[in-house]
Image (cartoon, rainbow, N blue to C red):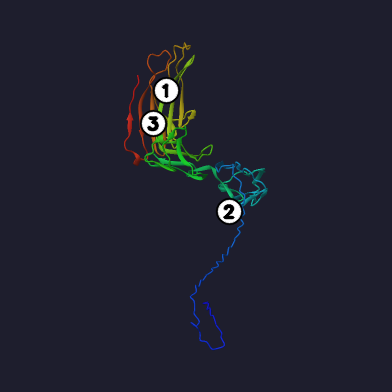
Amino acid sequence: MPMLICVFLVFTHSVPFLEGCKSKPSTTTTTTSTTTTTTTTTTTTTTTTVYSPTFVTDPRKFVVYEGNDITLPCNVDDLGSLQIKWERANATLALGDTVYEDDENRVHVENTENGSTIVIREAEEKDAGEYVCKVSAAELKHTVQIIVRPEVEPVPKSGLVTVKEGEPATLACNITRGNNKPYINWELESGYPIFWFELSNTIPEARRWSSGVYRCKASNGWPEPATAEIRLEVQHAPILSLTPSLDYTRYWTELMLMCSITASPLATVEWYKDGQMIEVEEDVTTREEQVTHRLHLKEMGQGYRNDNETWVLDQDRLGLYECRARNMMGEASRAMEIISSCDRDGQVQCFKRVKEIEKLVPAQLVNNSEVNNDEED
């Protein structure tokens, strides 16, 4: 505030102010004081660290044969007081030593200081998939693939396919089980491979030499492939040959005519002499697809110890001997003519092939008839 300094002189008489009351200029100082208030808020955060051990087992893919045991390891560097948990398809299989969801008693857990191994006995196809080993927040995943023993069956199930010669023949098989999906290859009964890789294959025009056993083989990594056999029978008219054989003994010579036939279905065989059917003693052997009928003609000549100078061959033994074979597909014939005795020291052959005839029946199957006339001196 302004300060006024007044000097009053008081006399007994009224005395006017001598210069009055003078006011002196004054200096005013204004001081402004500012107070700042700072408020500090302290927040305390508590962080809890969850311990997760480190896996020392690597994730793997396990390929297991059906029926073998599945063994999955899971080991860490330091398990401490934690427990290992096994899961599959979000379901718990085992926790520590406790096994869950094991109605078949196939699951077993083997625990060690820092790990666990789960064993699933006698693996089945349903056991394939992903298995998870959990320790705290850490996970280890194994993948299991089950190889299931393959099986195939022939089509038709009888394993027999029958066609007529010239018709198409389809050979097929079906895969009835197996995982992974098997791949197919074919071979002959001898093991010779055929370049067929499909379940079904067709021979456009089957021939008689197409007959035989064919094997369909399915492989998927199993130790042994599955095999189905299909027998193809191509029906055809008889094919035959007639072969002579001389057996010289001390006293007599025997002439044997061997009629070898291949036919499907099997052919009936008859022997004829000069066009008339004759009864013969049965002597038949079978080798693979070929059947051989034998006609024995005894005492057809003198042996090297036979000194009978008056002996002559009965003329009724001479003539045309014919072997005929017939089935539903056709007929064939071969013939041999006996022209003289078959002596050991004979200078002339006692037989000759005079005709070979093949024809098909029924008549609508006949395109032509083949007639071959071969003669041997």
Q: Residue at x 35, y 40 (%)?
A: 365
SS of the residue at dot 3?
A: strand
SS of the residue at dot 2?
A: loop
Q: Image quadrant for the C terminus? A: top left
Q: Residue at x 61, y 46 (%)?
A: 53
Whichever of callouts 1 and 3 sits on the residue coming sooner in the sequence is 1
Separation of disc 2 and disc 1 at Cα? Answer: 83 Å
Separation of disc 3 and disc 2 at Cα? Answer: 78 Å
Residue 333 is labelled as 3
* Of marks 3 and 2, the one in the foreground: 2
Is residue 49 shown left or right of residue 209? Answer: right
Whichever of callouts 3 and 2 sits on the residue coming sooner in the sequence is 2
Percent position of residue 100, x then y: 65, 51
Residue 36 occupies which quadrant of the picture?
bottom right
Residues at marks 2 and 1 touching, judged by CB atoms closer than 8 Å: no
Percent position of residue 230, x then y: 47, 39
Percent position of residue 213, x then y: 46, 36
Give the amino acid at mark 2: Asn
Residue 258 is labelled as none
Q: Residue at x 66, y 44 (%)?
A: 111
Query: In the current view of this chain or complex, which residue is farthest to the front?
Result: 12
Residue bearing mark 2: 90
Separation of disc 1 and disc 3 at Cα? Answer: 15 Å
Residue bearing mark 1: 244
